[in-house]
Amino acid sequence: MKYLVSVIIPTYNSENFLETSIKSVMDQTIGFKNIELIIIDDFSTDNTEEIINDYCSKYENIKTYPLVKKTGTPGAARNLAIKNSNSDYLMFLDHDDCYTKDAVEKLYESITKNSSDVSIGKFQTFGDGKIVSEDWIKEDVTLNSIEENLLFFSINNIWRMIFPKKFIVENRISFPEGVFAEDLTFMVDSFLNASKIIFINDIVYNFRLRQGEITSTSLSKGIHYLNGLTEGYDYTLKVLQKNNSCKFYDTILNQHLSTWLSDLILSDTISLKEKKELLEKSSYLFKNIKNINPFPENEENKILMEKIKDSKLDEVYKYIESYKFSKKINQLEEELNNKQIQVANLQTTKGWFKYKIKNIYQRLIKKN
């Protein structure tokens, strides 16, 4: 059976969130009968696979296909789903997020009425705190080429976009497998090949913001993730080369490499030796930037990125070492301050008890 839209969910160990995501697809105003939902599991170790199989047994338009091996990233799952999809349009959904009720209808209407190659909507966060994306866009926008507004390269979330399957297949656009930042590569390839891009001024996606994600995520990012990002950026570089579009390298990678560098410096889970090795391995990505200009602006990152570009890695290592040392000093000072507060509280409590005991003793004497 042919459907209007195929929604693709790659998943792993999502038993606590997956059914909420599925329900958001089933409740779409376009009608669930018009949607093919494909869920690909990456060898979960919880009850995710059982949940998927249960839904597949109840609904003929919910499908799953087995991966050959565990990859640890969403690329292979999405590629498999695209290959097996039975509709003319493709959308993506992360396993812990959900659509707004009319997301599929609005994006489908936008892409079919405008005959565009990509249609995009806004997203909002839910959970801890609320953020609405692209506050600089106040109305619907039509681009006949990505060159008309390079700011669109900063919109790299494929889960609030819709694509014609024919456009994806004919241009041989796919997700890199086994790496992170795979959605950046897919999006850049799509934007470069698109003859029309539509942005609708509507919120279509709810992105789950988990506790502490804004302030503490960088501290926990490990070497596997940061290494996987650089491998993903390398795929993006190859896509730019394939499309003869290396002139956009600075626009795209200034933003991502600046964030990557901050995450590397801030990470508490990567040793100093590993940070040096990772920086040396990825330095060629910085050297390819012609004009260092971090986005958003960050003067400290700009200086460090220029040093990497100029092969002054020893100076960057010293900065990382000094940052780690100063951070340790700050931690010790914070611990000492907390101890002093505890002592002060204890002294206050002790003094209060002394006062109460003396007061009770004096009252007893008066009574006798």
Image (cartoon, rainbow, N blue to C red):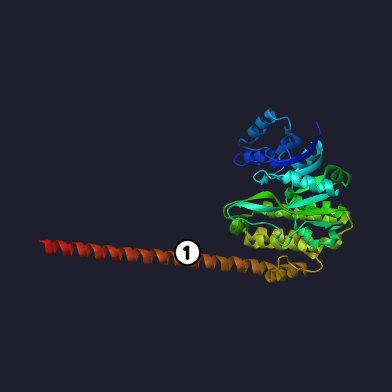
Q: Residue furthest left?
A: 368
- Looking at the image, is 7 positioned above or below residue 198? above
Check the image and report above or below for 70 versus 216: above
| 276 to the left or right of 146 | left
Residue 178 in picture, x, y percent from top left = 74, 46
Quarter the N terminus occupies: top right
Report which quarter residue 308 is drawn in: bottom right
In front of the other: 171 or 275: 171
Q: Could you tell whether 349 is left or right of 122 in the image?
A: left
Residue 291, given in percent of the width and then of the height, sits at: 80, 69
Residue 13 seen in this snapshot:
no
Can the viewer see residue 205 in this picture?
yes
- In the picture, which quadrant includes the C terminus? bottom left
In this view of the protein, which residue sits in the foreground, 241 or 33?
Answer: 33
Measuring from the top left, give residue 255's x and y in whole percent: 74, 62
Q: For the point 72% across and 46% down, which residue is it? A: 103
Residue drawn at the location 53% of the way across and 67% of the way down: 330
Q: Count numbered badges in the picture.
A: 1
In the rendered image, which residue does mark 1 sit on? 335
Q: Which quadrant of the view contains residue 230?
A: bottom right
Q: Identity of the amino acid at label 1?
A: Glu
User: Is 282 displayed left or right of 337 in the figure?
Assistant: right
Query: How would you rate the neighbour count of disc 1 (Cα within 10 Å): few for under 14, some for 14-19, many for 20 or more?
Result: few
Residue 112, image x, y percentages: 83, 45
Helix, strand or loop at disc 1? Answer: helix
